[in-house]
Image: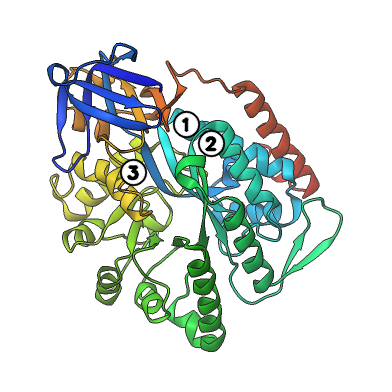
Amino acid sequence: MTSHAIIHTTAITMDAERRIIDDATVLFENDRITAVGPAGDVPLPETAEVIDGRDMITLPGLIDSHAHAGHGLTRNLGSGDGDAWFQACETIYTRGSTPAFWQAEARLSGLERLKAGITTCTMLLGGGADHYRTDTAEAGNLHCDATREIGIRTMLAAGLNRRPFPKPYRSLDLDREVSLSFEDQLEVCGELAQTNGDFLNDGAGVCLIMPVYSPEDFAQAPEDIRAMCRAAMDLREKHGLLFTQDGHRSGSIALAEDLGILGPWAYLSHSVDLTPEDMDAAKRSGASIVHNPSAIMSVLGRCPAPELREMGVNVALGSDAAAPDRGYDMFRHMAQCLHYHRRHFRDPEVMMPRDVLEMCTIDAAKAIGMDADLGSLEPGKKADIVMLDRRKPHLYPPMMPLTTVAQFANAADVHTVIVNGEVRMRDRKTALDEAGILDAAAGELNAALARCDLSHLFTE
């Protein structure tokens, strides 16, 4: 049995009492935490490997509840023309991507998440509901394999495209045209779920995603949409999957409840400009909301995160990364969340540091049904632990750790990351070939741009 002891640290536990312990000891054996408490109350096992936590803030591994596989390579193509960026992504993902592209992107985004203290993330397999890469299981399996290499956890959202079908794709080996049907994607999602089922211990799991349909969409094809929803829910129930969606707004959550696709196993991203009926539907169903305060949708509309939390709806935080204006720095997104709602209400106390930290730890764990194992530093939970180097000018003086984390810290302050009891980064050093990951990412994007005849569009 391997035991470790983090000593003399400031621990933000996020346990039921939301304890903050100034001189804390955190013990873990193998993959589970065994004790958390003041230094004098937690005896050290003689065989424990000691990790010095002086000048460190120790907190649960961060959870990013909504991000996109693929965008890690394409985000630097962004400019002032968002439509051009989205079109470039769709072209590359559906017609110019290869297995090497998806592998390189998964390794790059995984490395960025690890170095930002994100130990768990939901990743959508593609840019959105018009180009999920589920024509075969290969891209999804490569992403899950890369997650295991990096040593973090990914809940891969395997998806069903927006109607109408069939959808034109080019195969990943680029040698043929593919006419992709809803049934094809449904079968591949099931295959991915069978292959990657042990999220908690193995690091890679699969959830199901399908498009958000507005009341206007539904009015155009009610029978088709109901049939697709029934088929998706049958697959979800067969494999016991979580279910997520990307882009709820203005009546779509109430419609989702009517379509039978909401429950405590569902978490719904963006959720801007909600109607009272939408908010009531989220509450009744037990679905969680994923707020992405740095996303374009949060510029075009507003997610009522404080109001939802007040009425008892579970709200998690997502990066919606990567994109031309945002990455995987959850500290940035916490601070953005605070300012976003304080500005709306013109009230500097409408959300507080503890609220936003809850949204990317314990409340995010609730959203994926893992709050018994993740999201806080407590005995019996998985040893997913992040340590921040506090000995920096922007984090000093050493007081008020919640404020320090939510308003002043950034991803570069992450010193040590432990996942499943394994030290994956120490003093910002990993065992990964970081230079090789970066070089492969650059090479695969350039190759994809050349294949799609897009290189001339991105020269500045």
Give x and y (percent) for residue 458: 67, 41
In the picture, the quarter occupied by the C terminus is top right
Q: Secondary structure at mark 2?
A: helix
Q: Is residue 219 left or right of residue 25?
A: right
Find disc 1 in the rendering and name its residue: 114
Q: Disc 3 residue type?
A: Asp
- Name the residue: 44% across, 76% down: 214
Asked if labels 3 and 1 touch by Cβ distance under 8 angstroms, the answer is no
Mark 2 crowdedness (10 Å alpha carbons): few <14, some 14-19, many ≥20: many
Q: Can residue 398 be seen from the camera position used here?
A: yes
Q: Mark 2 or 3, which is nearer the eye? A: 3
Find disc 3 in the rendering and name its residue: 373
For residue 110, the mark is 2
Whole-angstrom CA distance, mark 1 to mark 2, is 6 Å
Report how many numbered discs are placed on residues in the image.
3
Q: Secondary structure at mark 3?
A: loop
| Viewer-proximal residue among 162 and 18 | 18
Give x and y (percent) for residue 283: 25, 69
- Name the residue: 43% across, 41% down: 120
Asked if labels 2 and 1 touch by Cβ distance under 8 angstroms, the answer is yes
- The residue sitting at the front extreme is 1
Q: Secondary structure at mark 1?
A: helix
Asked if 117 appears above or below 222 in the picture, the reply is: above
- Name the residue: 61% across, 64% down: 130
Whole-angstrom CA distance, mark 2 to mark 3, is 21 Å
Give x and y (percent) for residue 330: 37, 38
Mark 1 crowdedness (10 Å alpha carbons): few <14, some 14-19, many ≥20: many
Q: Disc 2 residue type?
A: Gly
Give x and y (percent) for residue 432: 58, 23
In the picture, the quarter occupied by the N terminus is top left
Disc with the residue nearer the chain's start (2 vs 3): 2
